[in-house]
Image (cartoon, helix red, strand yellow):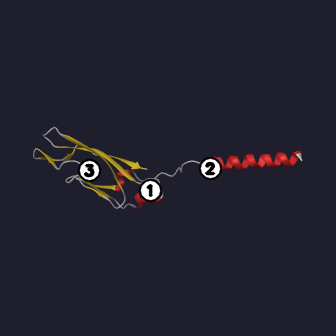
Amino acid sequence: MKLIGKFIGFAIMTISFYSFAGGGASSWIPNVAPSACVNIDESRISFTWNNNPECEKAISSGYASGVRIMGSASYVPDTTIAQFNKVLKRNMSLTIIDLDIYGSVNGYPAKLATMPIFRWES
């Protein structure tokens, strides 16, 4: 009887170990940088989704829901700077209005101050 008890105990420990060992997040990472999933129109300060197959895979696999875009616009020679931080999703576009920045300040049009930062949004 002791032998059966030891066997059952060993079986339970083994099953428990294997069920916990497989837990956790997937180790799959997209083969593309998030910036490759975004088309930029610098003259209008707008962003559109790039239907790159690798970008689509990142979304459909559940790795990301979109791409976070963080940046700023300046109105040179005016010293005003406007910052934006928005998420671009599949089949979507972000215009200057969507980014909540003005098209011009004191007659000076908005221009990207620097290249935006792109990150996967979970």
Q: CA distance from mark 1 to mark 3?
A: 24 Å
- Specify few, some or many for label 2: CA neighbours under 10 Å numbering under 14, 14-19, or 20 or more: few
Q: Who is closer to the viewer here, 2 or 90?
A: 2
- Disc 3 element: loop
Q: In the image, residue 91 lies at what x, y percent? A: 34, 62
Q: Earlier in the sequence, mark 3 or mark 2?
A: 2
Q: Amino acid at mark 2?
A: Gly
Q: In the image, residue 6 lies at what x, y percent? A: 83, 45
Question: Residue extending furthest top?
Answer: 79
Mark 2 highlights which residue?
A: 22
Per the rendering, the mark at residue 58 is 1
Q: Amino acid at mark 1?
A: Ala
- Specify few, some or many for label 3: CA neighbours under 10 Å numbering under 14, 14-19, or 20 or more: many
Q: In the image, residue 21 lies at what x, y percent? A: 64, 47
Q: Amino acid at mark 3?
A: Leu
Specify the quadrant of the image occupied by residue 40. bottom left
Mark 3 highlights which residue?
A: 99
- Disc 1 element: helix
Q: Residue at x 62, y 50 (%)?
A: 22
Q: Are marks 1 and 3 in contact (CB under 8 Å)?
A: no
* In-image side of 118 versus 26 (left or right): left
Q: Are marks 2 and 1 in contact (CB under 8 Å)?
A: no
